[in-house]
Amino acid sequence: MNPYLQWNLSHLVFYAITALWLLEFIIFPSKHQGEDYQEKRSFYLILLNIISNIFITLLFTYYGTFQIQEYPWSMLRYLGLIFYTGGILLRYTSTMLLGKYFSRDVHVEKEQVLVSHGPYRVLRHPLYLGLFLLVLGVPTFFQNPVAMAFTIFSMVRVLNRRMDLEEQNMEKVLGQTYKDWKKSRYRFIPFIY
């Protein structure tokens, strides 16, 4: 049997976080329904990308393709758990801070209040960073560098498109208020980008 398909404590933690990730849709339903700007297509592109990345990782894992099992590469499993845990914590925290303005679609209203505390004090898009860490955590946990590279490439691409779309429309609707707010925050990765 493939050692990556066996159960141990790290697998229990991984699947518990997976359950929290899936429960996010129930715990945090989209609340914000913007009238000034709304876009849904990018959510479905991101969802399709997530499903594709996870499917490829699980397929590679099942067949033992491109996996590195030797030490020190076996430590990737723990790095994957760190990514996965950090991603879910960042998503839950950011969602709670957004409150009534949280939405899985891009919604912008003129009266929208910009959140400036918690991870929003440093980042413009902590929800997307959390999502990136969650998705990257899957192939990292299963120690698959090819799936990791594919995930990084595809997720950065689709999330950058979403951030561009969101920022363009925040600037259109909120104007200078948003432009001033975003100047003092990193876009996606603290102290880097």
Image: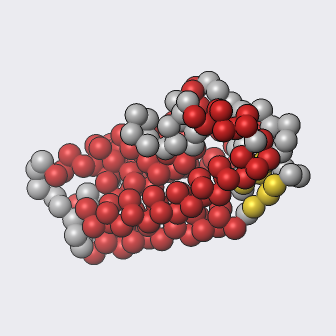
At 22% across and 70% down in the image, what residue appears? 66
Q: Position of residue 74 (x, y in %)?
A: 18, 51
If the image is split into quadrants, where does the C terminus sit?
Answer: top left
Which of the pair 169/80 is nearer the observer?
Answer: 169
Residue at the extreme front: 176
Q: Position of residue 96 (x, y in %)?
A: 67, 33
At 25% across and 62% down in the image, what residue appears? 145
Left or right of 106, for residue 112:
right
Total marks shown come to: 0
Which of the pair 102/125 is nearer the observer?
Answer: 125
- Vertical position of residue 64 compared to residue 92: above or below: below
At 59% across and 64% down in the image, what residue appears? 47
- Vertical position of residue 107 compared to residue 48: above or below: above
Residue 144 appears in the picture as rendered = yes
Residue 17 appears in the picture as rendered = no
Q: Position of residue 92 (x, y in %)?
A: 59, 37
At 11% across and 50% down in the image, what residue appears? 71
Residue at the extreme top: 117
Left or right of 187, for residue 166:
right
- Vertical position of residue 107 compared to residue 189: above or below: below
Q: Position of residue 35 (x, y in %)?
A: 88, 52
Left or right of 189, for residue 77:
left
Residue at the extreme right: 35
* Figure quadrant of residue 144: bottom left
Q: How is the image coloured?
A: secondary structure
If the image is split into quadrants, where does the N terminus sit?
Answer: bottom left
Left or right of 59, for residue 33:
right
